[in-house]
Every structure is written in structure tokens, then in C-alpha cells.
Image (cartoon, rainbow, N blue to C red):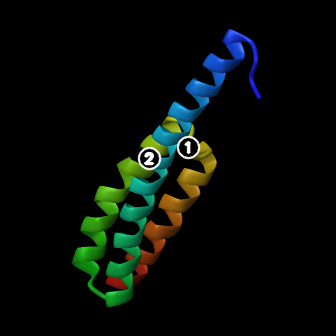
């Protein structure tokens, strides 16, 4: 249990940050799910639209520290490849 005032403040800050990061992660996963569903349905137009909406969300999550930059780039790259394969 935190005893000092600075430790108590740190606990409050961590709780706030965790909530914000959780919301960001959830939002990103929602966008990823929409792309996955569009790919699964086989609609290349819908998949491309969903990917264009998801890419900034994924990169924003990386910028804010929810994901590592390389992880975000890898996710975008793999999704883009799958969407490209769908339209071909």
C-alpha cells in the first residue's frame, strides 16, 4: 500500500493512464475487427475502406505508447497485404 503522498499520487496517475490506454487499445481492436470482418466477408471495397479507417488508429496507438511502433507497422502491413490479395 502506498504510504507517502508521492506514492499515492503515482497510484492515481497510473490508474488514470491505464484507463486511457485501455480505451485506446479497445478502440484500435474495434477497428481491427471491422477490417477482419470485411476480409472474411470477401468484400474488397469494404475491406479497403475499413483498412483506411483502421490504419491511423493503429498508428495513433503506437504514437501514444499503447503499441510498439514496429508492431503497429507489422499489423498494418499484414492487413494491407490481405486486402490486396482479396482484390486481386
Which residue is located at x 44 percent, y 46 percent? 24
At mark 2, the secondary structure is: helix
Above or below, 78 against 16 in this view is below
Q: Which mark is residue 32?
A: none
Spatial CA distance of label 1 from label 2 is 7 Å
Quadrant housing the C terminus: bottom left
In this view, the residue in front, 86 or 27, is: 27
The location of residue 35, given as percent across then percent down, is: 36, 71
Mark 2 surroundings within 10 Å by alpha-carbon count, few (fewer than 14), some (14 through 19), many (20 or more):
some
Quadrant (top left/top right/bottom left/bottom right) for the N terminus: top right
Number of marks drawn: 2
Residue 58 in the image, given as x and y percentages of width and height? 45, 51
Snapshot quadrant of residue 45: bottom left
Report the residue at 62% width, 45% height from top: 68
User: Are the residues flagged by discs 1 and 2 in contact, CB closer than 8 Å?
Assistant: yes
Q: Residue furthest bottom?
A: 41
Looking at the image, which is closer to me, 7 or 39? 7
Classify 10 Å Cα crowding around label 1: few (below 14), some (14-19), many (20 and above): some
The picture quadrant where one finds residue 27 is bottom left
Residue of label 2? 24
In the drawing, does residue 58 fall left or right of residue 88? right
Residue at screen point 51% across, 32% down: 16
Give above or below for 21 relative to 29.
Answer: above
- Residue located beneath label 1 in the image: 66
Q: Is residue 9 above or below residue 23?
A: above
Q: Position of residue 18 (x, y in %)?
A: 55, 39
Residue 77: in sight, yes or no?
yes
Q: Identify the secondary structure beneath mark 1.
A: loop
Q: Is residue 33 left or right of residue 71?
A: left
Q: Earlier in the sequence, mark 1 or mark 2?
A: 2
The image quarter containing residue 43 is: bottom left
Amino acid at each position: 500500500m502506498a504510504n507517502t503522498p508521492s506514492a499515492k499520487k503515482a497510484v492515481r496517475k497510473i490508474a488514470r493512464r491505464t484507463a486511457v490506454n485501455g480505451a485506446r487499445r479497445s478502440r484500435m481492436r474495434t477497428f481491427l475487427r471491422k477490417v477482419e470482418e470485411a476480409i472474411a466477408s470477401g468484400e474488397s471495397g469494404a475491406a479497403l475502406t475499413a483498412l483506411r479507417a483502421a490504419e491511423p488508429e493503429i498508428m495513433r496507438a503506437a504514437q501514444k505508447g499503447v503499441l510498439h511502433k514496429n508492431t503497429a507497422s507489422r499489423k498494418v502491413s499484414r492487413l494491407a497485404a490481405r486486402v490486396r490479395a482479396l482484390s486481386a
